[in-house]
Amino acid sequence: MITPDMQHETQRPHIARSTTAVARVCAVAAALGALATSSLARAQLADSVAAMSVEQYPGAESDGVAGETDLRIIRTSVGAPLRLSDETTLVVGAAYERLDIHTGEGEDLELHAPKALLGGIFQLSERWGVMAFGEVGLASSLDGSLGSDDLLMSLTGIATYRMTDSFQLGAGILYDRRSGELAPMPAVTIQLRVSERLRVRGFVPVWMRAELRATPWLDVGLRSSFETNRFHFADGAPTDRNAELAYTNLTVGPQVTFNFSDWMHLDLYAAGAVYRRYEMFDDDQSFAREGLDPVIGYGARFWIAPSGW
């Protein structure tokens, strides 16, 4: 059931919201809010030639939902950097994400997010560079006819500066509506090699990693991820055909990476939620927002790419 505060936020009386329907939406939201990811999100396709990950999250509770909801996520991606010249590299790729959700109401739900990426990395001088990426895809239940509400696009632009051979910093902007609102978000990239065995890498706010090379075949470290997305419920929407759900999830946890070779790797990780919330929209108008109880998930990611050490 929706809490009294959430009912007070409702401004559109023409929308039919039965108790069962809204509870189903909230259960989906609870599962999405439990999501923690090891992918590099918007920069993921430039990270590896190919990758596949599986994540499992135990039951999570919310004040607005009876029972617990658990979640499994499967992700696959392929990407290819194409060197056009000494100064220009083209990046193309595709990815797919599937969320399998079992709600406290005993329902099994699926959400899908296929996308394609096109971008470029441009070396302007010995120290200065520019990265620009565009993504287009779907974020939908895919249970009815598709429309513009199912379409998601994003743009990323980053200017980079190489201070030394071991330290590169970048700053720029992300622009999309995954968090629920169409708004720009500042972004920072960092590549810092503290020593031959210790490095820090990240694309803030999306992901950050501190890694220690324990042996040539094993890396240990700490990872954080910040994930947002906005899914549209097509003709099978629980409340209204224009209903959309946005989630935000910030996690921190340990990770180990097994290096089978310089090109083949397996990440095993756990993630503790630091901040989680979900929000429901109808025609871009928010009508429900809820925080979620903490949960610890775990996952594995197999990826093919040079390790960079």
Image: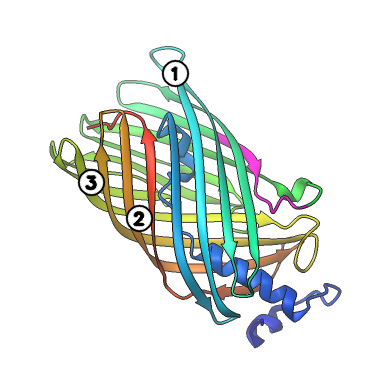
Residue at coordinates 66% horizontally, 80% vertically from top-left? 6
Badge 3: residue crowd in 10 Å (few <14, some 14–19, many ≥20): many
Q: Looking at the image, is mark 3 or mark 2 earlier in the sequence?
A: 3
- For the residue pair 119 and 212, the one nearer the viewer reads as 212
Looking at the rendered image, the quarter that the N terminus falls into is bottom right
Is residue 56 depicted above or below 264 in this figure? below
Placement of 203 over or under 283, stated as above or below: above
The residues bearing labels 3 and 2 have C-alpha atoms spaced at a distance of 12 Å
Please name whichever residue, 168 or 117, is drawn nearer the observer in this view of the structure.
117
Residue shown at 65% from the left, 49% from the top: 139
Whether residue 86 is visible, yes or no, is: yes
Tags 3 and 1 touching, CB below 8 Å:
no
At which x and y percent is residue 66?
Answer: 59, 81
Where 59 sits versus 227, above or below?
below
Residue type for callout 1: Thr
Q: Is residue 247 left or right of residue 19?
A: left
**Magenta-highlighted residues:** 134-143
Q: Check disc 2 and report its element: helix, strand or loop.
A: strand
The residue that disc 1 covers is: 88
Q: Secondary structure at mark 3?
A: strand
Q: Is residue 15 left or right of residue 267?
A: right
Whether tag 2 and tag 1 are in contact, CB under 8 A, the answer is: no
| Coloring scheme used | rainbow
- Residue on which the image places disc 3: 211
**Left or right, 277 with reference to 246:** left
The residue to which callout 2 is attached is 224
Amino acid at circle 2: Ser
Residue lying farthest to the right in this orientation: 14
Classify mark 1: helix, strand or loop.
strand
Q: Is residue 305 magenta?
A: no
Q: Quadrant of the C terminus?
A: top left
Residue 36 in sight from this viewpoint: no
